[in-house]
Image (cartoon, helix red, strand yellow):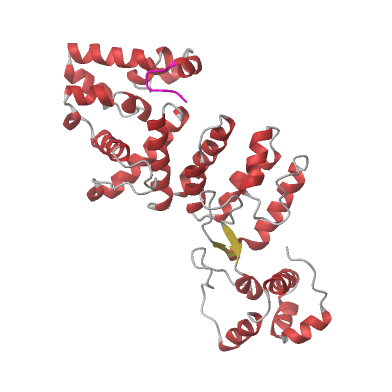
Amino acid sequence: MHDDDDDDGIEEENDMTIPIENQERMALLDQVRLKDGNDKLKKVFQESAAQDKEAAVNSLNHEDLQFTSLFLLRDEIEKLAILEQLSERNQIAMEIVKDVLSRENDTSPASCRLPICDHIQMVHSVLRWMLETGSKDDGLSSEYIQVLDTTVSLLTTLFRDDMVLPIIADLIFTRAERELFNYHLIWAFFEAREPYTLDLIANRLRSPRVKEAKLARRLLAFVPGIDVHKDTEGEQQYRTFQHWLEENSPFLHYRGESFQETSKPVPYDVALKGKYLGRSVSVDSGEILSPLTKEEDQILEEFDKDDEDVKATIASSSEMTRYQSLEDWDTLVRRPLKERRKVEKLGGSR
């Protein structure tokens, strides 16, 4: 892991010529950091502030400044006492950073106090800016990781922002590749409670990178047919996942299990009564969203009396029949379960 002043890895990555077309819209401070490293960034800013403090403030307030540069210059900003001269975006970002780094280490990453909550929509915009412009420098320091983890958690739990999930998915896998702690990111990704975005993980099942494919299998091991130990069947497991998601996405209920709690978490399960009746359920509660008729209540009352394996099989059979013929399904679902069991061979659930 890198320290703020330990630029060996960062400089190696950033020691490159910035394309001319990017230089015109990139903040000067970012250009210096990316070309010459973090120490040079601090030195240039200090010299600029000594010559013209207002110009130095303006360089910080550049519209396209990346969060990484602001984070690295926070000590200089404090020494110069220029916090109040920063833009609203930068002031909020600085407050968030201060709040995160002042908390106890064992505090949940989603428990930021957000003292600027009077401007909650602006906070959302700033958090997204922090992640979008700062994620490429993940691993900069332990403090930087702590700030990014909290940023991610707030975006998915407080703001339910699913637009940032592709960035979070990338961070999860790049950290795994670098053997950095990623359980907070994994927790925050699933806490978004958006089943369709599981495909952002499932795509990695086919990855030629061993660590990436292995982690994808671990994260999706709750899906029937995804085997953590089968590392040569990526394409087949991806097709298995796609079939499962297509069949069950309207009926998925978020359970919230995470790697902090168990080595084999089950973040989602299938709300079988919703699947049996072909009714979408609330991802939060697992309850059917639309009102039920008396007849449907009676059907579910009978359905609930069976054990889970039987219910899973009957629900899958019901869903398959409904997909093939609504008329046949309507007849089937109204048939007493005792009669159905006589004509159906109850196999394993999907």
In the rendered image, residue 3 lying in the magenta stretch gets the answer: yes
Count of numbered circles on the image: 0
Magenta residues, start to end: 1-7
Residue 54: x and y in percent read: 17, 20
Q: Is residue 290 visible?
A: yes
Left or right: 118 as drawn, with respect to 321: left
As drawn, 265 above or below 347:
above
Q: Label the magenta part by its dominant secondary structure.
A: loop
Q: Which quadrant would residue 116 be assigned to in this image?
A: top left
- Residue 315, horizontal then vertical, whole percent: 69, 72
Res. 19 visible in picture: no
Q: Which residue corresponds to the image point at 64% horizontal and 62% vertical from the top-left?
A: 248
What residue is rendered at 31% in x and 27% in y?
Answer: 70
- Rendered view: 302 above or below 117: below
- Left-right relation of 301 to 289: right
Q: What residue appears at the point 65 percent right and 82 percent down from the top-left corner? A: 305
Residue sitting nearer the eye, 289 or 261: 261
Quadrant holding the C terminus: bottom right
Magenta stretch encompasses residue 246: no
Residue 118 picture location, percent across and down: 22, 50
Residue 205's spot in the image, x, y percent?
A: 68, 42
Q: Residue at x 49, y 68 (%)?
A: 285
Is 111 placed left or right of 341 in the picture?
A: left
